Image (cartoon, rainbow, N blue to C red):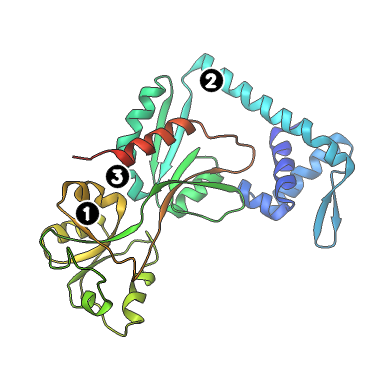
Amino acid sequence: MNIDHIEAFLYVVHFNSFHKAAEALFLSQPTVTARIKTLENELDSVLFERQGRGIILTEKGKAFIPFADQIIRTYQQGKKQLKKGSYREEITIGANIITSQYFIPYALPLWKKENPDLRFKFISAPNDALVDKLLQKQVDIAFMKDVTHSGLQNHKVLDNSIRLVVYPGHHYQFQKDLSAQQLATEPLVFFECGAFDWNQVHKIFEVSHVEPRIEFQVDHLEVAKSLILSRSCIGFLPYLCIKKELEQGTLVEVDVSHLIKIKQHIHLTHLKYGVEAPLLWNEILSSVQKFEKLLLY
């Protein structure tokens, strides 16, 4: 009996769909169908029946679920035990670019300190690539923007809301109820690399029928931040990249919540089915709390 066939069975049970199970396993639907058929032949039992365009579990299929689940759990525990006996256990962590640059360097040493026998492998990649790596089980957990996928589970862990920031002494520093018309007169830097929907920022000006004064359009956060620090412009930037500067006072946030609210979070993402609480879960939550309270001087 093949473990992959049992895993395919549990995924089909969970999603109630061969297509969704195939998507979550990163396999073709015919491959999943073939695995289920082979398992049914080995068990000499029909596990699923067609019902219109959908499927339903047979009584024998329902009866097999706890045994299938136990087989998978026992197999995973066995692998883990063998790893402990031969070499250090390894976890592969992925993160999108902004989290890689501003949070991971702080968190990794903390996680290693709490888990000295655990070997860490880290991958930095765009959000779309991280989804693929999670589904292919090349990455155990990933820090990324919110993603909707039937096979993935998301947990909010880091605030990365978009803030309007200016340099100290700018005449907007203490401005209350800043208008879109006022904002449009200032030189702006726009950072665009898929971090969030910039159309939301453009809407500020569209609804007021004014054209923003975009002097710089860049695809690198540090370039955008440096332009603001050099007093060449002002701009909207995600919180993670400006946390230190806001604490130091080298950048100042201007409240424009009456114009726009762009709430954005970094999520801890992992496979939804067949996985309990991710490894390092408690350590990750602890490091997030410490990071949010930390003064990055």
Does the image show residue 139? no
* Residue 160: image location, x then y, percent: 36, 52
Instruction: Please tell me whether mark 1 or mark 2 is closer to you in this view.
Output: 1
Amino acid at the residue labelled 1: Glu
> In which image quadrant can residue 236 be found?
bottom left
Q: Residue furthest top?
A: 85
Q: Which quadrant does the C terminus fall into? A: top left
* Residue 98: image location, x then y, percent: 33, 50
Give the residue displayed 38% in from the left and 61% down from the top. 194
| 30 with respect to 59 (left or right) | left
Q: Which mark is residue 222?
A: 1
Q: Are marks 1 and 3 in contact (CB under 8 Å)?
A: no
Give the residue displayed 40% in from the left and 52% down from the top. 126
Does the image show residue 212? yes
Report, in whole angstroms, how far the alpha carbon at label 2 lies from the one at label 3: 32 Å
Label total for image: 3
| 115 with respect to 164 (left or right) | right
Q: Which residue is mark 3?
A: 102
**Residue in front for this viewpoint, 278 or 36:** 278
Amino acid at the residue labelled 3: Tyr
How busy is the neighbourhood of tag 3: few (under 14 within 10 Å), some, or many (20 plus)?
A: some
Among numbered discs 2 and 3, the one appearing first in the sequence? 2
**Residue in front for this viewpoint, 237 or 183:** 183
Q: Which residue is mark 2?
A: 83
| 237 with respect to 36 (left or right) | left
In this rendering, the answer to whether 65 lies above or below 51 is: above
- Is disc 1 placed on a helix, strand or loop? helix
Among numbered discs 1 and 3, the one appearing first in the sequence? 3
